[in-house]
Image (cartoon, coloured by chain):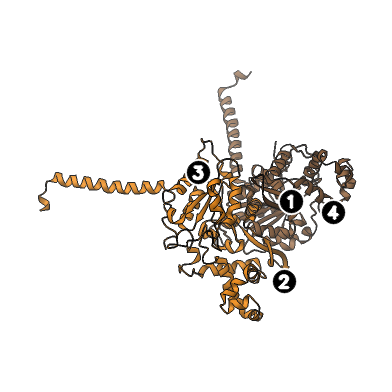
Chain colours: A orange, B brown
Amino acid sequence: MNHSQPPMMTLFRLAVFGSVACFAVCFCSISNAADPLPSWNDGPAKKAILEFVAAVTDENGKDYVKPAERIATFDNDGTLWVEQPIYTQITFIFDRVKELAPQHPEWKTTQPFKALLEGDMKTVAASGEKGILQMAMATHAGMTADEFTAIASNWIKTAKHPRFKRLYTECVYQPQLELMSYLRASGFQVFIVSGGGIEFMRPWTAEVYGIPPAQVVGSSIVTEFQIKDGKPVLVRQPKINFVDDKAGKPVGIYQHIGQRPLLAFGNSDSDMQMIQYTKAGDGLRLGLFVHHSDAEREYAYDRKSHVGTLDKVLDMAADNDWIIVDMKRDWTAVFPEK
Amino acid sequence: MNHSQPPMMTLFRLAVFGSVACFAVCFCSISNAADPLPSWNDGPAKKAILEFVAAVTDENGKDYVKPAERIATFDNDGTLWVEQPIYTQITFIFDRVKELAPQHPEWKTTQPFKALLEGDMKTVAASGEKGILQMAMATHAGMTADEFTAIASNWIKTAKHPRFKRLYTECVYQPQLELMSYLRASGFQVFIVSGGGIEFMRPWTAEVYGIPPAQVVGSSIVTEFQIKDGKPVLVRQPKINFVDDKAGKPVGIYQHIGQRPLLAFGNSDSDMQMIQYTKAGDGLRLGLFVHHSDAEREYAYDRKSHVGTLDKVLDMAADNDWIIVDMKRDWTAVFPEK
């Protein structure tokens, strides 16, 4: 019977189990405190990030960089959130065309609108960049800046990814959310530098990524200031203003941020120039690419993909000291828990 | 004789003077703590600013605005620093032309370079905007981004204002330095929105105004990313990219900041659209203009001035609830003490 055990034994058990429990609790909390990137597996990518941040924030080290110069830039599509099977903004364009169709009877006989409205996606795809641009202008221009913000905000609140059945804003990468928080906690200013539309992103990046509108760099259309019915408004025009992609990315960074990044993160050949520009700066710099290698949890694509082509970068990475982050190997989780 | 005075009298004197001294010290420090704008005279402008900031930062008030939405924009020339007798950047252009002349023998026979090199300022002035633009392109383009930053940085370190014999960066307005500090302390993000060249300002705004490069919006020329001798560089092209003036200012704000300002401060008709856009937002907004009314301490100019014309604004201010800050009346000091 229990109560017949010598009191000393009971005390001993209590002591042992108590210690173990305490040790476990302490170990966990120490481990959490010590690891700012819990969704990153130990490996060369995580090691490179941790060592880089430690070096540039060590006031007594030779690689120290003042907080004012700690700029980090992230591509968005495929780097911070899912870009397959098609860019989210393309889905937005398609949804908007369908919603606006009743006000545009001419679309029933005009390509590529006709094909889209009839669900003929082959013809839509065949219309290529020109077709997409036509639909982009029809859905992104002609309204005021405030009206477009409301349209984009409302769409993103309910639109879901076709495969993951989650809001697009929940198809963001958990390891990257951790990395951006870690960088901010280490005195970095984090910017998005995306080929996507700047005004499509700004309504939600603060809430989803912690990145305020002024820290979003992207492609844009021309906007005009007008006094309309006595009220000053900005009216969006159907004309490209700036394409923040490929060689446009370092230019966008120069125009918008005015400082060379210390760290830049992309996922495709379109991000190569941003990483080249970043790495060409003085002192320690870090350039990284997500390699989508995980068909099970997300997607597997690289050299031959039309969306997010990663080809030249894979050939050039080793010689240029670019870090390839392998999604399957390096990330313990892909999306945030719901 | 002194030492024959009764000790009581000495004690009394000590007590009285001691108290006065203490009172003076205490009063000063209380007064400083209570007044975030010591170089602003009490009056309608200062009152409007203090009441506005109190209202938008009062969490229990009906006009409360979250810190993330507290955006303030300031014009630069004539609003934050002296713009007379000519814009500082024009002086920079002239100095650069003179310095580069030995490498450009063709300038000896090409206007307006010839006139400038001969000191014939009438002919230079007669060349108008076109002539200035020609000289701007000759001095602002053709080099890398980093090279231009170094050129602008070096110039601003030694260039002095012809009348005040101070560095241009010391010809900034003390009351505005106080206002920007006060706004930042009240949770605002402060941006420059200037018609001047963005890359001419960025090298020194952090040190002089506390405004980092990414918070400077301005006019720009086209820049191209190139790989030159194996090195990635940004090369400045002799072609206008964006004119951040008049109706361009709200557009620049939209493109660059992505949020409508809560407070905007200018000094000329060129700032009118920025203020109109600001005031057209929901809730409480503040729009202000410096009126240069102080020929003695700075300059007096408005409707007829070629630099910083303030004409329409003066007619429209009352109806539109724009605050006119009268330099002579509203500012106790103009420049910082050296």
Q: Is residue A227 above or below residue B68?
A: below
Q: Are marks 2 and 1 on the same chain?
A: no
Camera-nearest label, 2 or 1: 1
Camera-nearest label, 2 or 3: 3
**Type of the residue with mark 3:** Phe
Residue of label 1: B237
Residue nearer the viewer, B277 or A74: A74
Residue of label 4: B304
Q: Is residue A195 above or below residue B197?
A: below
Q: Are marks 3 and 4 on the same chain?
A: no
Camera-nearest label, 4 or 1: 1
Query: Measuring 56% from the left and 25% from the top, which residue is drawn there?
Result: B8
Image quarter (top left, top right, bottom left or bottom right) of the C terminus of chain A: bottom left
Residue of label 2: A229
- Tag 2, which secondary structure? loop
Residue of label 3: A52
**Type of the residue with mark 2:** Asp
- Return the x and y of residue A308 as percentages of the image width and height: 55, 60
- Tag 4, which secondary structure? loop
- Return the x and y of residue A46 as percentages of the image width and height: 45, 48
For marks 4 and 1 on the same chain, the one whose residue lies earlier in the sequence: 1
**Type of the residue with mark 4:** Lys
**Type of the residue with mark 1:** Gln
> Is any atom of residue B40 visible in this view?
no
